């Protein structure tokens, strides 16, 4: 029985752009993936927290689950993009009848992911320290 071929470039792109809602996990492992649903659950949890608790809390902390999910997705995107093609095919394309041949676009996606992840991580750390030590006096 042949399985569908999982494209490493598409998986890396999906993890970079839509990783915070788990779309890359659903592409790779299907709708039965519990970690994909955990990523996806971060969006409604953050929206509900914002709607119900925005008067009492700092808004930045209310989107914490979505921010954490996005940072984890950046790491997953790096892992996907940096996986060698042979190992990728052994894990996801064992019975597909095709072999992966990654191009330079995967490298560009990995570099973009490193930039996005670094900016998001530094911004999250800076905002957390601002809220903890000044009570949010600077924004």
Image (cartoon, rainbow, N blue to C red):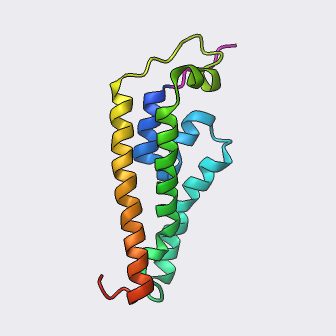
Q: Position of residue 11 (x, y in %)?
A: 48, 34
Q: Residue furthest top?
A: 97
Q: Position of residue 26 (x, y in %)?
A: 57, 40
In this rendering, the answer to whether 69 lies above or below 14 is: below
Can residue 15 be seen by looking at this rendering? yes
Check residue 2 for magenta coloring.
Answer: yes
Check residue 137 for magenta coloring.
Answer: no
Frontmost residue, 11 versus 113: 113
Magenta residues (range): 1-6
* Quarter of the C terminus within the rendering: bottom left
Instruction: Give the side of residue 31 with respect to residue 84, left or right.
Output: right
* Quarter of the N terminus within the rendering: top right
The residue under the point 38% across, 74% down is 127
In this rendering, the answer to whether 68 lies above or below 32 is: below
Q: Main secondary structure of the magenta part?
A: loop
Q: How many marks?
A: 0
Can residue 43 be seen by looking at this rendering? no
In this rendering, the answer to whether 82 lies above or below 50 is: above
The residue under the point 57% across, 25% down is 88
Frontmost residue, 14 versus 137: 137
Q: Residue furthest left?
A: 138
Q: Position of residue 52 (x, y in %)?
A: 51, 80
The residue under the point 42% across, 69% down is 125
Q: Position of residue 51 (x, y in %)?
A: 47, 77
Frontmost residue, 74 versus 59: 74
Instruction: Give the side of residue 50 with respect to residue 26, left or right.
Output: left
The residue under the point 44% across, 40% down is 14
């Amino acid at each position: 029985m042949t399985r569908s071929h999982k494209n490493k470039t598409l998986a890396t792109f999906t993890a970079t752009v839509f990783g915070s809602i788990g779309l890359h996990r659903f592409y790779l492992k299907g709708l039965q993936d519990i970690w994909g649903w955990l990523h996806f659950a971060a969006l409604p949890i953050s929206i509900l927290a914002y709607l119900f608790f925005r008067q009492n809390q700092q808004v930045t902390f209310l989107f914490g689950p979505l921010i954490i999910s996005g940072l984890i997705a950046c790491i997953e995107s790096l892992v996907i993009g940096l996986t060698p093609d042979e190992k990728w095919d052994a894990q996801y394309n064992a019975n597909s009848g095709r072999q992966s041949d990654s191009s330079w676009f995967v490298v560009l996606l990995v570099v973009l992911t490193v930039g996005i992840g670094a900016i998001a991580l530094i911004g999250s750390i800076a905002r957390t320290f601002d809220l903890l030590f000044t009570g949010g006096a600077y924004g």
